[in-house]
């Protein structure tokens, strides 16, 4: 079923994604496009019912105020100009109402009363549409996917399995820096429950040998990223790469914020968007990116609709280098194992206390120094474990979760009793800024 669409044209607003998410919450699909969208690009968009000319503080570029092109004004599509002196528009607001309720009512009135859009944007329709689009794009060819176990790659995998079945091959690389139980969960869910063609690569020794003695955080990140590419490249070539009769498509967990954050003509780039994650140029694939128009919460809703377990769908943000940047300094195997066990205890006790889903991110850190303690009536010299639990909306700022004292005491008792080589448990009280969320 083809969904109605509202197009948001970026004329300098800082609220493009906020408005887009509001309108999708009304059940109407929306996309953000540059202010100078061409007539051809506009005509290619399906079922456009309305256009919002979303102006704002960045509407002056290179000394001149920007405006939409004549194709927009001559389209015959209802227009809403916000904080922008439009040439002509069916309706105009000086700015969005300051209060949330007023803004949402203005959005609702334009979408439904002016544009007569239908509330037919939902996850079931999205999944059905993407399955059809994937089948049209891929045909009878094969797709390769790097399956980390993170939310985005897991949802892409589940969607591709639904669309093309055994035409998909997933490669899960265990670099030894995942949390306790995560590699086993990937195998259980995708190979045993969903019947995926899953190649499991045990590269623990390979990664940890490369990381031996490396203390600099950026050096660790580069080693982990580069080695992952090498391992994935090797597995892809074993399967035929993009050679005749081999694999021609690469599944990618790109989501809408990746595209939006790459920058527009009126906004600075937040982070670059690399379609193939730095894969070698001679390993050529056509990309399959079925989630590229979804926000993160919509990706999670898609995962739920596809039947993925909550533990995977609601997995916390996890750095690409994994535990490699929470095992501070040069990584050692014994300290890495202490970190993994302490993290598992923390997550278990947060679950029992009903904090999962209420605290944005929580994890443990083990630094590369020791302190004096007493164990079994004798002096011991062991590591501390640092607990970090924060809440945030956009990860630009973060506040510290005030965890109940009995919960912290229970976590402390378990870590000190069960995690080898640890004699202290600390709680990080530092907000962002001045601290960052991660330690490295």
Image (cartoon, grey):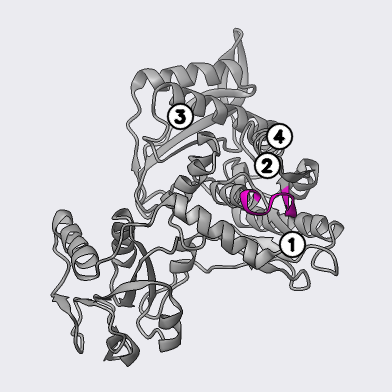
Mark 1 vs 3, N-terminal side: 1
Q: Looking at the image, is mark 4 or mark 1 nearer the viewer?
A: 1
Q: Which mark identifies residue 331?
A: 2
Q: Would you name the residue on which mark 1 appears?
A: 140
Report whether residue 364 is seen. Answer: no
Q: How far is mark 1 from mark 3, CA to CA?
A: 55 Å
Residue at 56% in and 28% down? 344
Mark 2 vs 3, N-terminal side: 2
Mark 3 Cα within 10 Å, few/some/many (few <14, many 20+)? some
- Give the image location of residue 299, x and y in percent: 48, 51
Q: Would you name the residue on which mark 4 appears?
A: 192
Mark 2 secondary-structure assignment: loop
Q: Would you say the magenta stretch is mainly helix, strand or loop?
A: helix
Q: Looking at the image, is mark 1 or mark 3 nearer the viewer?
A: 1
- Magenta stretch: residue 175 in it? no
Task: Give the residue furthest to the top.
Answer: 377
Are the residues flagged by discs 1 and 3 in contact, CB closer than 8 Å?
no
**In this rendering, position of residue 246 left or right of residue 87:** right
- Give the image location of residue 143, x and y in percent: 71, 59
Q: How far is mark 2 from mark 4, CA to CA?
A: 33 Å
Q: How far is mark 3 from mark 4, CA to CA?
A: 39 Å
Q: Looking at the image, is mark 2 or mark 1 nearer the viewer?
A: 1
Mark 3 secondary-structure assignment: strand
Mark 4 secondary-structure assignment: helix
- Give the image location of residue 71, x and y in percent: 34, 89
Q: Name which quarter of the figure residue 1 lies in.
A: bottom left
């Amino acid at each position: 079923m083809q969904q109605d669409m509202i197009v948001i044209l970026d004329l300098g607003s800082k609220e493009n994604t906020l408005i887009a998410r509001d309108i999708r919450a009304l059940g109407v699909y929306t996309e953000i496009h540059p202010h100078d969208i061409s007539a051809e690009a506009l005509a290619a968009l399906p079922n456009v019912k309305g256009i919002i000319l979303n102006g704002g503080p960045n509407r002056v570029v290179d000394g001149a105020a920007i405006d939409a092109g004549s194709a927009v004004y001559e389209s015959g599509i209802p227009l809403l100009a916000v904080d922008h002196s439009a040439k002509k528009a069916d309706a105009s607001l000086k700015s969005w109402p300051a209060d949330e309720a007023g803004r949402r009512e203005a959005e609702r009135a334009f979408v439904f009363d002016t544009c007569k859009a239908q509330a037919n944007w939902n996850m079931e329709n999205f999944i059905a549409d993407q399955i059809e689009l994937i089948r049209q794009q891929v045909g009878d060819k094969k797709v390769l996917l790097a399956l980390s176990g993170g939310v985005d790659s897991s949802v892409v995998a589940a969607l591709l399995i639904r669309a093309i079945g055994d035409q998909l091959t997933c490669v899960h690389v265990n670099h030894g820096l995942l949390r306790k139980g995560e590699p086993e969960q990937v195998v259980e869910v995708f190979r045993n429950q969903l019947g995926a063609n899953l190649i499991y690569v045990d590269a623990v020794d390979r990664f940890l040998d490369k990381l031996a003695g490396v203390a600099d955080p950026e050096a660790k990140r580069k080693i982990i990223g580069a080695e992952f590419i090498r391992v994935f490249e090797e597995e892809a070539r074993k399967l035929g790469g993009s050679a005749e009769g081999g694999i021609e498509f690469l599944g990618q967990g790109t989501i809408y914020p990746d595209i939006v954050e790459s920058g527009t003509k009126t906004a600075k780039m937040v982070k670059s968007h690399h379609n193939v994650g730095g894969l070698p140029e001679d390993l050529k694939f056509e990309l399959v990116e079925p989630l590229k128009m979804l926000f993160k919460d919509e990706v999670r809703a898609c995962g739920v609709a596809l039947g993925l377990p909550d533990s995977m769908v609601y997995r916390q943000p996890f750095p690409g280098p994994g535990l490699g940047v929470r095992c501070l300094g040069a990584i050692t195997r014994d300290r890495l194992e202490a970190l993994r066990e302490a993290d598992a205890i923390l997550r278990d006790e947060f679950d029992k206390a009903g904090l999962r889903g209420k605290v944005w991110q929580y994890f443990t850190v083990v630094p590369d120094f020791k302190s004096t303690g007493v164990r079994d009536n004798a002096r011991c010299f062991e590591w501390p474990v640092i607990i970090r639990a924060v809440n945030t909306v956009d990860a630009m700022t973060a506040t510290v979760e005030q965890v109940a004292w009995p919960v912290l005491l229970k976590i402390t008792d378990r870590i000190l009793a069960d995690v080898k080589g640890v004699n202290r448990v600390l709680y990080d009280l530092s907000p962002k800024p001045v601290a960052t969320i991660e330690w490295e």
